Image (cartoon, rainbow, N blue to C red):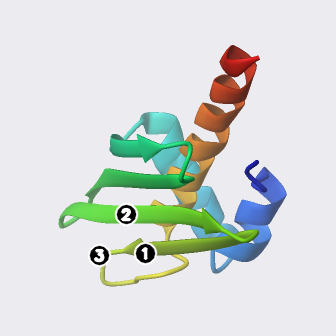
Amino acid sequence: MFSLTKERIKNEVADSIEIYKRGESIFKTGNYHLKEAAFDRQSFRYDVDGRYGDYDVSVDFKDGEIQSACTCPYGNGCKHIAAVCLDILERVARFETEGE
């Protein structure tokens, strides 16, 4: 269903290992809120607490590709998207386990 792993987040989603680590920190502290999850459409929307306000993050999985966007000044490849992808990875694991 979803082709998401921590390695893929490190290598393809985050612009660098440093950004991945910052995203991991956001994930561990829980500074985000899931607004919408459509597992059937593989589409997710989040609010992420940022240094200068809240940012809207969207992640969609289409044809094996990860399509993401963030309203922060950094944009695509940012720590907010990395954090959200880590949360999605955890949620998908729970969803697939509970769905069996």
Q: Is residue 57 above or below residue 15?
A: above
Q: Residues within 10 Å of mark 3 (few under 14, many from 20)?
A: some
In the rendered image, residue 66, in percent from the top left (x then y), is placed at 64, 70
Q: Amino acid at mark 1?
A: Ala
Give the SS element for disc 3: loop
The residue pinned by badge 1 equals 69
* Distance CA(mark 3)–CA(mark 1): 7 Å
| x and y percentages locating residue 20 in the rendered image | 63, 63
**Could you tell me which residue is drawn at 68 percent across and 20 percent down?**
99
Q: Which mark is residue 60?
A: none
Residue depicted at 75% across the width and 54% down the height: 4
Locate residue 24 relative to residue 46 in the image: left or right.
right
Mark 3 belongs to which amino acid?
Answer: Thr
> Residue 91 appears in which quarter of the rendering?
top right
Query: In the image, what residue type sits under mark 2?
Result: Val
Disc 1: CA contacts within 10 A as few (<14), some (14-19) or many (>=20): some
Alpha-carbon distance for marks 3 and 2?
A: 7 Å
Quadrant placement of the C terminus: top right
Query: Is 51 situated above or below 44?
Result: below
Pointer 3 with pointer 2, Cβ within 8 A: yes
- In the rendered view, would you say 63 is above or below 20? below
Q: Which mark is residue 57?
A: 2
First along the sequence among labels 3 and 2: 2
Q: Position of residue 59 (x, y in %)?
A: 50, 63
Mark 2 or mark 1, which has the lower sequence index?
Answer: 2
Q: Residue at x 65, y 36 (%)?
A: 92
Identify residue for label 3.
71
Q: Secondary structure at mark 2?
A: strand
Dot 2 alpha-carbon crowd within 10 angstroms: few under 14, some 14 to 19, many 20 or more: many
* Position above or below: 86 against 22: above
The reply to whether dot 2 and dot 1 touch (C-beta < 8 Å) is yes
Alpha carbon of mark 2 to alpha carbon of mark 1: how far?
Answer: 6 Å
